[in-house]
Amino acid sequence: MSHHIPPEIVIEILIRAPVQTLIRCRSVSKQWRATIDDPDFIKRQINHSFKTSTNNTLFIKEEYGQQFFDYDFDCSGSCVSMEFRDLPNSSLTRSFSIVGSSNGLICLRNESNDDILIVNPSTRKHQWMPGLLPLKFHSCVNLTWDGTGFRGSGYGFGYDRVSDDYKIVRIAQVHNPANDGFLESEVLICKVKTKIVRAVKIPFVVPTSHRMAVLVNEALHWIAFRYDDPRVSDVIVVYDLVTDEFREYPLPKLVDDNRFGMDFGLLGTRLCLFVDHEDDGVDAVWVMKEYGVKESWTELFSISYTELKYAYVRPLGFSKRRLEVLLELDGNRLVWYDIEKKKAEHFVLHGLQMTHFTATILLRSLAPVPADTN
């Protein structure tokens, strides 16, 4: 550290620096490297980024390709592709889907066998974890059920600060012949570092369209409905990563729930709901201004899908000015939508084949990737 500046002041300066700057600063001296690599420093840097809405990046996974893309919002125009050549078979990345992100780490799973890949796009560190999730639940007969239009599972990824461990959550709907073929849902909760796995049952079905959980307030959220009472409207199912408990929150009361399609996301630090008004051709984005309070749901803006010509839309995040929202359209287009002017501008990333992809906003950090101790 500099002899002219107190160490605590240097630390405060470094915490406010962009992550790519911190990576370069690790080469300044052994003392700076030790400071920047210190777990307490990394946690403080993450907390500062959350509070100031800085160090955000756009992580993109091509659906039919082997590449991942990382776009840095703080360095406009910088879109970097990533490949992981030390996997047993590089073609495995073609079948990966995004489970979720937490503290700057992104969790992906192989759709054919649920093997896990955890990546820090900022440091380019990654860990391949085959066999981390068992292929079957504790009491599953089948992992899918063909009796309804719903299939597949819900997934989530988050950090439990009490146990200092990451958790991967998988929700599956199963067919139970012992109960006249009645639908049941089981949740698998896996701690990444300790590999402790437990299974619980919940009375909810998570439709395939809402399978990736939204992480906010140290909890994972899915849109779901009760399979034991189809008259109950859709709700938000919440898994608290710290208390290890499930609860539910209400969705905003709409004119007629049966007229709407919905999707779920995160805008800034608030839960976001995209509502498809099928009859009038106008879609609306709602945000929960006060976490957990039904009355705080507020319509943020509306857009016409006839103008943008899309079948499916998902809000991803705010711009730095918080006047534009980045939208993913049909999994093959990105647009910035100006809330005040009600205008959209296409967002093209050089190097990305705009065919079909999945995108998510990710925090840049120096968080270490959990090691595989096998």
Image (cartoon, rainbow, N blue to C red):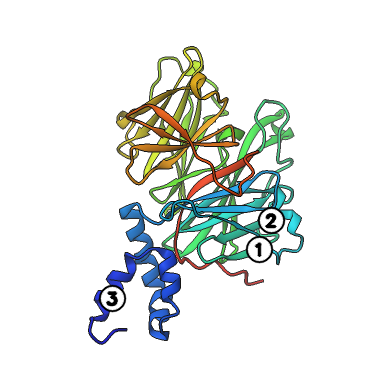
SS of the residue at dot 3?
Answer: helix
Asked if disc 2 and disc 1 are in contact, CB closer than 8 Å, the reply is yes
Badge 1 amino acid: Trp
> In which quadrant of the rendered image does the C terminus lie?
bottom right
**SS type, badge 2:** loop
Q: Position of residue 358 (x, y in %)?
A: 59, 43
Q: Which mark is residue 10?
A: 3
Q: Secondary structure at mark 1?
A: strand
The answer to whether residue 172 is seen in the rendering is no
Q: Nearer the viewer, mark 2 or mark 3?
A: 3
Is residue 340 at all visible to an observer of this figure?
Answer: yes
Q: Residue at x 75, y 55 (%)?
A: 91
Q: Which residue is mark 2?
A: 115
Q: Residue at x 30, y 32 (%)?
A: 296
- Where does the image place residue 196, in percent across and percent down from the top left? 58, 61
* Amino acid type assigned to the residue bearing label 2 in the image: Asp
Tell which circle, 2 or 1, labels the residue nearer the N-terminal end: 2
Q: Earlier in the sequence, mark 1 or mark 3?
A: 3
Q: Mark 1 and mark 3: span between their CA atoms?
A: 36 Å
Q: On the image, which quarter does residue 318 sit in?
A: top left
Per the model, the C-alpha gap separating discs 2 and 3 is 41 Å
Q: Which residue is mark 1?
A: 128
| Distance Cα–Cα, label 2 vs label 1 | 8 Å
Within 10 Å of disc 3 (Cα), the crowding (few <14, some 14-19, many 20+) is some
Q: Contact (CB < 8 A) between labels 1 and 3?
A: no
**Can you tell which of label 1 and label 3 is closer to the viewer?**
3
Q: Is residue 132 above or below residue 211?
A: below
Q: Amino acid at mark 3?
A: Val
Pick the residue in front: 281 or 104. Answer: 281
| Residue at screen point 44% across, 30% down | 344
| Residue 15 disc label | none
